[in-house]
Image (cartoon, rainbow, N blue to C red):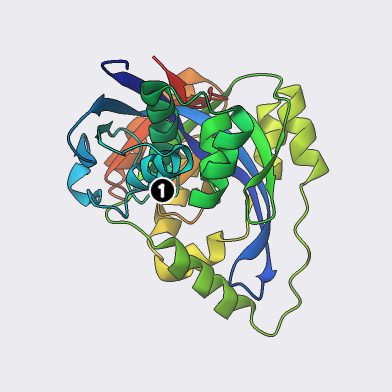
Amino acid sequence: MTAAVTVRVPAKVNVQLAVGAARADGFHDLANVFLAVGLYDEVTATPADELRITCSGPDAAQVPLDATNLAARAALALAERYGIDPAVHLHIAKDIPVAGGMAGGSADGAAALVACDALWGTGASRDELLAICAELGSDVPFSLVGGAALGTGRGEKLTPIEVGGTFHWVFAVADGGLSTPAVYGEFDRLTAGAEVPEPTASPALLAALRSGDSGALAEALSNDLQPAALSLRPSLADTLAAGTEAGALAALVSGSGPTTAFLVADEETAEKVAAALPASGTCRNARVAASPAPGAQAI
């Protein structure tokens, strides 16, 4: 048995999040275009007497350290499948914003799965790991895969997408989180009585990703959850405006929020926008990252 395994896993931004009407099971059909970005958590798995979770890094105090943590659930799911005692210490070094709509918890679940698979030598296939990821949550499979992908169903059915260049981003971190179920609930309230179209991926957006054209991608970005996030947190509109005024090509709420994402032309503009956002008083801090980024991998 290996002494320790550390897995690095990226955050994500949804460059398109098309949301269908609520299904009978409470979920929504999605056309969710994921792009992995270069902000990373690291999960280290070491043998232990029992399953234990620890966490360090920004906002680590907000991360649950019990069985509700997706990293713990991943270890338990893999151990059950292979008849292994889930006696492992999982340490999460956080750098992805917590409860920020960038799939930090999902990323930790994927990373823990890869780390435990290597630590225990289970030899699980990629398809087996992806199946466990899908059981854990809608965003977890993409955290394993990385790069760019279209997620359909509730987001867990992935089709890889070609990306023809590097895209530069700034992410504004808000004070406090937003509950994803609450944002979807607000989406349902705002769309009540209206006909919600079937979610489909935007051909213009997919073409922009393939060509690596930042300007074309800026015109095609969309997030059907943004009105709901702004309804619950109106102050996010000020953050979006501040980033645009500072030179971003486009701005949108990342996933269910409250992190806001700004697509910029180049690294120099990214640094300028990242300095302007906290100075505007509309967010706690800002982070610069490029995409695409690889999925969960041992380092």
At 51% from the left edge and 73% from the top edge, which residue is drawn?
A: 185
Query: Which of the 4 image quadrants contains residue 218?
Result: top right
The spot of residue 94 in percent (x, y) is 28, 34
Residue sitting farthest toward the right: 203
| Residue labelled with disc 1 | 259
Whether residue 195 sits left or right of residue 75 in the image: it is: right
Q: Is residue 4 left or right of residue 8?
A: left
**Residue 272 in sight here:** no
Q: Is residue 257 left or right of residue 50?
A: right
> Taking 289 as reference, is 108 above or below it?
below
Query: Is 76 above or below relative to 96?
Result: below
Q: Nearer the viewer, residue 136 or 101?
A: 136
Q: Secondary structure at mark 1?
A: loop
Seen in the picture, residue 276 relative to 191 is either above or below; the reply is above
Instruction: Work out which residue is located at the far front of the displayed protein and give it.
Output: 83
Which residue is rendered at x = 42% and y = 39% of the image?
A: 83
In the picture as drawn, the residue positioned furthest to the bottom comes out as 193
Judging depth in this view, the residue of 123 and 107 nearest the camera is 123
Q: Residue at x 41, y 66 (%)?
A: 234
Q: Residue 272 in the image: x percent, y percent?
A: 40, 27
Point 41% across, 40% down: residue: 109
| Amino acid under disc 1 | Thr
Quarter occupied by the C terminus: top left
Q: Residue 36: which quarter of the image?
A: top right
Q: Is residue 227 visible?
A: yes
Q: Nearer the viewer, residue 237 or 202?
A: 202
- Quadrant containing the N terminus is top left
Q: How far from the left and from the top, in percent, is residue 156?
A: 62, 48
The percent coordinates of residue 146 (x first, y second) are 56, 29
Looking at the image, residue 70 lies above or below residue 149: below
The part of the image, by quadrant, that contains residue 33 is top right
